[in-house]
C-alpha cells in the first residue's frame, strides 16, 4: 500500500503557502493604495501651498519639459544654448 504521508504534508504546506500569498497580496494592495493616497495628498498640498488656480495648474501641466523646470525653479529658460566647449573649461 502506498504511503501518502509525504504527499499530504506537501499539500498542507502548499495550502499554507497559498494562504500566506493571499494575505501578502492583500497587504501589498493596501500599501499601494496608501502610497497613492499619500502622493495625492502631497500633490494637493503643494498646489494649495503655491496658491495655484486650476487654470494655472493646467497651464503648468501643459508646458514642455524646459518650461516646467523654469517655472518650478522660478527661472525663465532662454532658448540659447551654452556654447562653452571642453577646451574653454580647461
Image: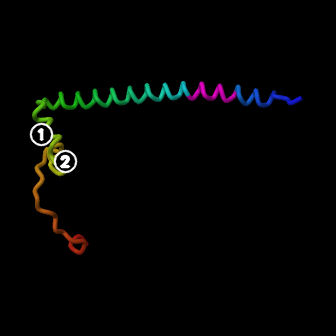
Secondary-structure class at tag 1: helix
Residue 55, picture quadrant: top left
Residue at the spot x=13%, y=44% of the render? Answer: 74
Q: Which residue is mark 2?
A: 69
Magenta stretch, main secondary structure class: helix
Residue 33: assigned label: none
- Disc count in the image? 2
Q: What's the magenta region?
A: 13-21
Identify which residue is drawn at 49% across, 26% down. 27
Residue depicted at x 20% and y 73%: 88
Give the labeled residue for mark 1: 59
Q: x, y percentage for residue 76?
A: 10, 50
Q: CA distance from mark 2 to mark 1?
A: 13 Å
Q: Determine the residue positioned at 65% across, 25% down.
A: 16
Packing grade of label 2 (10 A; few <14, some 14-19, many >=20) is some
Q: Position of residue 62 (x, y in %)?
A: 15, 43
- The image shows residue 4 at horizontal and vertical percentages of 81, 28
* Left or right: 6 as drawn, with respect to 43: right
Give the quadrant of the C terminus: bottom left
7 in magenta: no
- Give the side of residue 14 with respect to residue 35, left or right: right
Colour scheme in the image? Answer: rainbow
The N terminus is located in which quarter? top right
Amino acid at each position: 500500500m502506498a504511503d501518502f504521508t509525504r504527499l499530504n504534508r506537501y499539500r498542507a504546506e502548499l495550502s499554507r503557502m497559498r494562504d500566506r500569498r493571499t494575505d501578502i497580496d492583500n497587504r501589498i494592495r493596501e500599501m499601494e493604495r496608501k502610497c497613492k493616497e499619500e502622493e495625492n495628498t502631497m500633490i494637493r498640498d503643494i498646489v494649495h501651498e503655491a496658491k495655484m488656480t486650476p487654470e494655472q495648474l493646467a497651464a503648468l501641466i501643459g508646458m514642455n519639459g524646459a518650461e516646467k523646470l523654469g517655472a518650478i525653479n522660478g527661472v525663465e529658460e532662454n532658448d540659447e544654448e551654452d556654447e562653452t566647449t571642453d577646451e574653454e573649461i580647461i
